[in-house]
Amino acid sequence: MRYVLFSALVSAVVSAGTTVAMNKFVFSKELVDVPQVMNLPLATARSLVESKGLLLLVSEEKEDGKVVPGTIVGQRPLDGSKVAKGESLAVVVSKPLSAVRVPDLVGKPVADAKARLESAKLAMGKLTEVADEKAAPGQIVAQIPLPGAEVAVGYAMDLSVSAGPPKLPVPNVVGRGMAKAKDELQKAGFTVGAVKTKSDDDRSDGIILEQVPAAGQPAPKGSAVELVLNRT
């Protein structure tokens, strides 16, 4: 019985001594302030961290198109925290954005082009309307970069969109005969549309009394001009 009590007492003393020793060891470690390494190049950050007696650990590489690759974009613990010398500072380092291939958008309506860009992880940049005799209004007629080119994820592509045929001034055919009016319209890039008749005894029979669009008004090339023909 005495032996058991003695052994228990010795164990308690040893345990207490060990705890005191460990606490003394822990609290004897020098604490240092964690430095600010955000937005620093990795090499610069490593030198700064090691100068404080800490270790720098790259915990993650993250795509980021807003900073130069190799820049610190995250850290734990945060700057100003106190840690023991020899501890690690985990950082997140930026890497280049993944490259994607540019899809072919020519001939597609704007809505379809936008959907294809989003599917390819790209964005729509500047839209410019241009006159085009062949493409329907709203169709893509040109793109930059060209199909197949490799660009970074999120790149904004500039597109040219058809505004339809170019607009030209309509010639004045009022007062002309039908044959002459048709000839002048065709030479100017237009066609004769609906022809109505109207009676005006003060004007010669068979001449054009009115036209729509009016003379000088811009109209799409190839469009029809409606005429009113005098019949007395």
Image (cartoon, grey):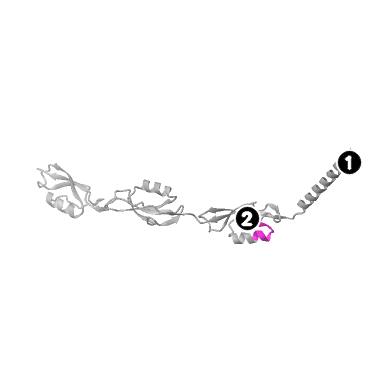
Q: Is residue 220 left or right of residue 122?
A: left
Is residue 160 located in the magenta-colored stretch of the structure? no
The magenta stretch is: 48-56
Point 76% across, 51% down: residue: 26
| Spot occupied by residue 70 in the image (x, y as percentages of width and height) | 56, 58
CA distance for labels 2 and 1:
52 Å
- The percent coordinates of residue 110 (x first, y second) are 36, 48
State left or right for residue 210 relative to residue 56: left
Element assignment for label 1: helix
Residue carrying label 1: 3
Observer-nearest of 96 and 1: 1
Indicate which disc, 2 or 1, sits on the residue closer to the N terminus: 1
Instruction: Give me the disc on residue 57.
Output: 2
Identify the amino acid type marked 1: Tyr
Q: Is the N terminus in the top left, top right, bottom left or bottom right quadrant?
A: top right
Residue shown at 15% from the left, 53% from the top: 183
